[in-house]
């Protein structure tokens, strides 16, 4: 779960109708449970370890802004160090930038650091991509808080998450995701995408036949 309430752990789904009742109990996994395990996550080669670190950095309260900038820069540098290809770096960068939002001035400093790093490595993946629209899209969809932009961005991030985890998506799944106009449902599907082990299992929930989301 991606909420910020450590005590919120809904480990049971229950429905009742007349004299009938159905109860489904399940383990709860919260990203907040990884607080204090940052070094372990950084050593973990699973790509989702970096996304969890980005989430933890974003929700951490009381941290100095310099420390937040340093953490976000280190996460982006780690994408290069792990040898990911250009497309994967861009997908992960967009996702990290979406959940780990810095104040405007700090964002400018962050981009300067990334620009310097890319110039040193002679791999200007991110700074080039920004010039063709990534930065503008993120600002419109997230920072301005426009409902339509947020929905479109959430749909895009959900598809990116599934692509990173399972590879290229079938066109029918892409189409179904783009037809969802409920941001809460997109968020619920995002949580399912993180914890599910197969694309088929995700598709069942996407079609409304699974227990992961409530119609």
Image (cartoon, rainbow, N blue to C red):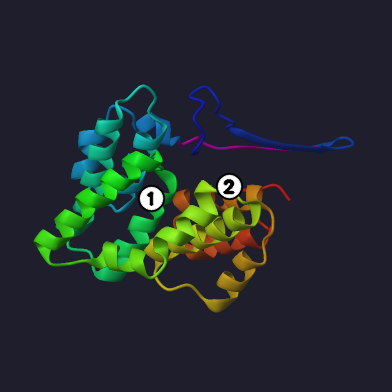
Check disc 2 and report the residue beneath it. 145
Residue in view at x 53 percent, y 65 percent: 200
The residue segment tinted magenta is 21-29
Q: Earlier in the sequence, mark 2 or mark 1?
A: 1
In the figure, residue 171 lies in which quadrant?
Answer: bottom right
Vertical position of residue 133 compared to residue 115: above or below: below
Query: Which secondary structure, mark 2?
Result: loop
- Which disc is residue 97 wearing? 1
Residue in view at x 46 percent, y 56 percent: 138
Name the spot of residue 170 as percent of width and height, x first: 51, 76
Residue at far left of view: 120
Is residue 58 rendered magenta in the image?
Answer: no
Residue in view at x 50 percent, y 47 percent: 143
Residue at far bottom of view: 171
Q: Nearer the viewer, mark 2 or mark 1?
A: 2
User: 125 or 14, which lies in front?
Assistant: 125
User: 78 or 123, which lies in front?
Assistant: 123
User: 179 or 149, which lies in front?
Assistant: 149
Query: Which secondary structure, mark 1?
Result: helix
Name the spot of residue 87 as percent of width and height, x first: 31, 70
In the figure, residue 68 lies in which quadrant?
Answer: top left
Name the spot of residue 174 as percent of width and height, x first: 56, 71
Is residue 23 rendered magenta in the image?
Answer: yes
Residue 166 appears in the rendering: yes
**Mark 1: few/some/many CA within 10 Å (<14, 14-19, 20+):** some
Task: Left or right? Give the position of 84 relative to 14.
Answer: left
Vertical position of residue 12 compared to residue 170: above or below: above
- Which disc is residue 154 wearing? none
**Mark 2: few/some/many CA within 10 Å (<14, 14-19, 20+):** few
């Amino acid at each position: 779960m991606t909420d910020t309430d450590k005590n919120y752990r809904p480990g049971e789904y229950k429905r009742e109708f007349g004299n009938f009742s159905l109860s489904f109990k399940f383990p709860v996994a919260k990203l907040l449970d990884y607080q204090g395990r940052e070094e372990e996550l950084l050593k973990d080669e699973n790509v989702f370890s970096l996304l969890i670190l980005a989430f933890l950095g974003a929700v951490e309260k009381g941290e100095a802004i310099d420390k937040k900038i340093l953490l976000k820069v280190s996460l982006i540098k780690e994408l290069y160090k792990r040898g990911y290809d250009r497309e994967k770096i861009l997908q992960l960068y967009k996702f990290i930038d979406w959940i780990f939002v810095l104040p405007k001035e700090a964002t400018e400093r962050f981009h300067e650091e990334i620009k310097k790093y890319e110039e040193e490595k002679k791999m200007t993946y991110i700074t080039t991509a920004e010039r063709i629209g990534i930065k503008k899209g993120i600002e419109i969809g997230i920072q301005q808080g426009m409902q339509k932009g947020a929905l479109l961005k959430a749909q895009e991030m959900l598809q990116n998450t599934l692509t990173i985890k399972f590879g290229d998506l079938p066109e029918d799944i892409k189409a179904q995701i783009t037809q969802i106009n409920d941001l809460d449902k997109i968020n619920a599907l995002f949580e399912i995408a993180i914890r599910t082990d197969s694309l088929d299992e995700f598709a069942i929930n996407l079609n409304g036949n699974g227990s992961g989301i409530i119609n």
